[in-house]
Image (cartoon, rainbow, N blue to C red):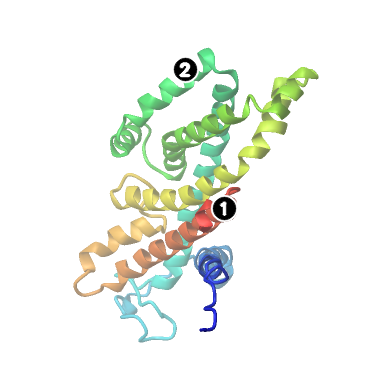
Amino acid sequence: MSAPTPTATSEIPAKPARRGKKFARFRQLEFVLGILLAGGMCLAVLFSGFLFPDGGEKIDLMARLTPPFVKASHIFGTDPLGRDVLARVIIGGKISLQVGLISVAGAVAIGVVMGLVAGYYRGFWDILVMRFADVQLALPFILLAITFIAIVGGGITNTIILLIVSQWVQYARLVRGLVLSLRDREFIQSARAIGVADIRILFSHLLPNLIGPVIVLMTLNVATNILLESSLTFLGLGVNPLIPSWGGMLADGRTYLQNAWWVSVFPGLAIMLTVLGLNLLGDWLRDSLDPTGKTSQ
């Protein structure tokens, strides 16, 4: 009589467990890489005044268009006016990150309040907010940008306002949908029954349950706004070209791509790596804040 073969029941859970461990390691790697890319750029921007006291505006015509890695004083080379490309890339990151962060904060402040009101009160307020959102979503962003800039002009402040106007809708629709799923839950009904004011229900009971999805969307939108600001500045619709910014550096260097590629390539790499880092952090947050754990399966 042959020996009994081992059953497969003990081996079946091993594969999902291994997949779960691999996914957990991948998420850790995703988080670390996101922190290194996005956090490294943020730290460089914060200390840019100490690293480059001249603000990247020091002109040296004798060193114009110096290739990268030739001089220790100009690791990324110089632009057509002899200005250090590394200094201008880091200084330019201050403008792009400033626009991205402030515009997202403004869009969140408006969109969350509008979504809370629309989802909680329904009726007239819901119809008003959502129809206005539908009209705005029907407008292509580039058409909205051209019209807005033609009326009020460019600049950092107007670019931030444009991004707020174009993105508050995303937060309003997200928050409204979440509020609709929560407004009839037991803890909300109990708060109403004991006479808790609506304003307290909105901001003390409903809002804390919406933080996770909103934070994830904020992280991804900061990356999106950096791209949009750079694109608008590249087209001449955003930040003043006299102010160092990634989009402006790309625009200035496009005529030198054949004989001075570094003038455009390094600002482009800064945009790509910063946006990649923020997207990785957004993905990590989405998986970490998922209460059902479905994204880890």
Residue ID for mark 1? 293
Amino acid beneath label 1: Gly
Q: Comparing marks 2 and 1, which lies closer to the viewer?
A: 1
- At 34% from the left and 80% from the top, the residue drawn is 68
Q: Position of residue 11 (x, y in %)?
A: 54, 71
Query: Of 55 and 145, which appears nearest the observer?
Result: 145
Secondary structure of residue under mark 1: loop
Q: Is residue 158 left or right of residue 256?
A: right
Q: Position of residue 184 (x, y in %)?
A: 64, 24
Residue ID for mark 2? 128
- The numbered mark, 2 or 1, whose residue comes first in the sequence reads 2
Q: Quadrant of residue 273?
A: bottom left
Q: Quadrant of residue 159?
A: top left
Query: Of 11 and 108, which appears nearest the observer?
Result: 11
Label 2 neighbourhood size at 10 Å, few (<14), some (14-19), many (20+)? few
Q: Quadrant of residue 262?
A: bottom left
Measure the C-alpha gap from mark 2 to mark 1. 35 Å
- At 51% from the left and 37% from the top, the residue drawn is 107
